[in-house]
Amino acid sequence: MADPNEMILAGSTPKHSNPIDALHSRTSFVLAVDSLLLTFFFYGIFGELAFIPGVFFLAVWSSYRSKSEWAYWFVPIIIGTLTLGFCLLMVINVYTLINSINITTLIFVLILAYAIFSSVRFIRIHFHPVYRMGYSGESVYNDGVKLAPGEMLAACPSCLAVLAINPMLLSPSDVCPHCNSKLVISGEEE
């Protein structure tokens, strides 16, 4: 029998026990990659002294994966630091691109733009109350919520806002009141 406290996004198949765990797993992977990139950057500047921030990044990553409270806010700081570096690199490459059109530089600018966009999304999620509650182990369900007959709690697939919905009345044109993204994900978009 399914756990009644298990949250499943409307229109999706759960791969983890809940979407917060799936998002936490993806964020942990991004943190590991960003930490490695920052450690290599520090190694290029400081040499063997990059061992110090490398050990710190490893401690943050390990603690974040085990959902330690102290590591929570270091993650957006680390990802944000690398994002600022990406922004600087993109400005330099756009300047280079303006002076001489080069397909390699254009591709690099597009990759950096996507990396910046993705990083900002991972930073923003740390400010979402549902993610914070899921990270800390609190229940994202309020037992005092009065739902109308046929309604259930579900999360927006884009912003994870918890919504009271009637799944029988959902249509592909319904959008989240918070982020205006579609609530029903069609099989073609996956």
Image: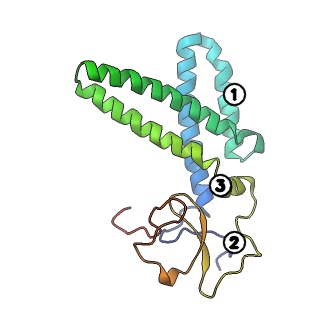
| In the rendered image, the vertical position of residue 166 relative to residue 42, given as above or below | below
Label 1 – label 2 distance at C-alpha = 35 Å
| In the rendered image, the vertical position of residue 15 relative to residue 31, given as above or below | below
Spot occupied by residue 154 in the image (x, y as percentages of width and height) = 59, 71
> Which secondary structure, mark 1?
helix
Q: Between disc 1 and disc 2, whose residue precedes?
A: 2
Label 3 – label 2 distance at C-alpha = 15 Å
| In the rendered image, the vertical position of residue 68 relative to residue 78, given as above or below | below
Q: Quadrant of residue 102?
A: top left
Q: Between disc 3 and disc 2, whose residue precedes?
A: 2
Nearest the eye: 171 or 29: 171
Which of label 3 and label 2 is nearer to you?
A: 3
Residue type at mark 3 is Tyr
Spot occupied by residue 84 in the image (x, y as percentages of width and height) = 52, 28
- Disc 3 designates what residue? 131
Q: How is the image coloured?
A: rainbow
Residue type at mark 1 is Phe
Q: Quadrant of residue 36?
A: top right
Spot occupied by residue 156 in the image (x, y as percentages of width and height) = 54, 64
Residue density around tag 2, few if under 14, some if 14–19, many if 20 or more, within 10 Å: few
Spot occupied by residue 50 in the image (x, y as percentages of width and height) = 62, 17
Label 1 – label 3 distance at C-alpha = 24 Å
**Which numbered circle lies on residue 5?**
2
Which of label 1 and label 3 is nearer to you?
A: 3
Q: Between disc 1 and disc 3, whose residue precedes?
A: 1
Residue type at mark 2 is Asn
- Disc 1 designates what residue? 56
